[in-house]
């Protein structure tokens, strides 16, 4: 069966169960509103342009934060891969920081920058930087020695060797790192916006929760999940698959 058809059937069954459970009052509406209420909340949110402004604000923060994290992460990845001293010192710190959830940085970010855009973007940058660093580092270190030896026999050394052989060979890892960085940055953004002053999807999620508007809470959660899935599967997953096929790492 086609994977798309499987997904359609799965979500149809899921929504049917949700609808039936709401009608039969298997749970309280305050816990999980009915699909109609969630749809109504989303329609109102888009009609009064609240959710549109939220989407624009969130994507602006994501674009800035993710862009910075990819640049810093790539630079750090190259540094750790090419310098043994940096890898044994700074690399240990990067590895440790990678295990720290981005939201943990939020109180510190608020103390440093205040409750504003800079604090949220700072959290987003941290969310994507370290995973990009570790993936690119691994990619450069895993370049086949045969490629390097072959290039050196043809007189390629230093920057020329890195530019023509090492970096191109590590591109599959870099693409995977960018895909993971996007996912981590998106999560970090939502966490950061929960304590922001708005607008933003995370801010609206907290605002709706504070006022008991669970239909809007569920609606925003659906939007966050749908955006994450679309960007990952329709953009990054396709790019990653194309790169892996080009380099013969996937049939």
Image (tube, helix red, strand yellow):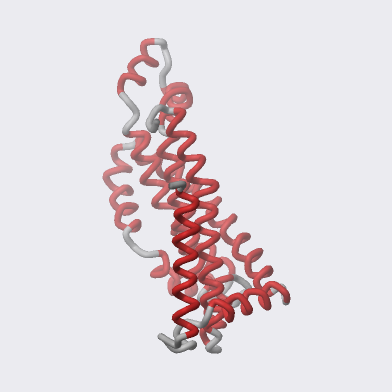
The quarter of the picture where residue 104 lies is: bottom left
Examine the rendered structure and indicate whether residue 63 appears above or below residue 86. Answer: below
Give the image quarter of residue 244.
top left
Q: Horizontal placement of 171 versus 94: left or right?
A: right
Report x, y in % for residue 100: 34, 63
What residue lies at 54% left-to-right and 46% top-to-bottom? 235
Name, please, the residue furthest toward the top.
154
Across and down, in percent, residue 23 comes to 49, 84
In the rendering, at what x and y percent does residue 151 appear?
Answer: 39, 16
Image-based side of 89 in relation to 163, left or right: left
Nearer to us in this view, 237 or 24? 24
Q: Quadrant of residue 199?
A: bottom right
Residue 124, above or below 150: below
Residue 21 vs 134, above or below: the answer is: below
Identify the residue at horizontal 37%, vertical 64% (top origin).
Answer: 101
Q: Nearer the viewer, residue 9 or 180?
A: 9
Q: Position of residue 227 (x, y in %)?
A: 55, 60
Q: Residue at x 41, y 19 (%)?
A: 157
The quadrant of the rendering that contains the C terminus is top left
Looking at the image, residue 167 lies above or below residue 85: above
Q: Residue at x 33, y 17 (%)?
A: 149
Considering every residue shown, the one lying at the far right of the view is: 48
Task: Tally the marks.
Answer: 0
């Amino acid at each position: 069966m086609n994977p798309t058809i499987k997904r359609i059937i799965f979500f149809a069954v899921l929504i049917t169960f949700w609808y039936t459970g709401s009608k039969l009052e298997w749970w309280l509406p305050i816990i999980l509103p009915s699909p109609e209420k969630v749809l109504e909340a989303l329609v109102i949110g888009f009609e009064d342009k609240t959710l549109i402004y939220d989407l624009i604000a969130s994507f602006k923060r994501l674009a800035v934060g993710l862009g910075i994290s990819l640049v810093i992460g790539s630079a750090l990845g190259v540094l750790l891969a090419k310098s043994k001293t940096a890898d044994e010192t700074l690399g240990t710190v990067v590895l440790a920081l990678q295990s720290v959830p981005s939201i943990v940085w939020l109180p510190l970010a608020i103390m440093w920058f205040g409750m504003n855009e800079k604090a949220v973007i700072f959290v987003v940058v941290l969310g994507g930087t370290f995973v990009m660093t570790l993936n690119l580092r691994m990619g450069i270190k895993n370049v086949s020695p045969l490629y390097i030896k072959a290039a050196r026999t043809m007189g390629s050394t230093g920057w020329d060797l890195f530019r023509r052989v090492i970096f191109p060979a590590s591109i599959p890892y870099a693409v995977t790192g960018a895909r993971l960085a996007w996912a981590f940055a998106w999560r970090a953004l939502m966490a950061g916006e929960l304590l922001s002053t708005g607008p933003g999807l995370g801010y609206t999620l907290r605002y709706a929760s504070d006022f008991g508007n669970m239909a809007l809470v569920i609606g925003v959660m659906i939007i966050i999940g749908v955006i994450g899935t679309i960007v990952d599967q329709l953009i990054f997953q396709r790019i990653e698959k194309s790169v892996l096929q080009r380099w013969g790492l996937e049939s």
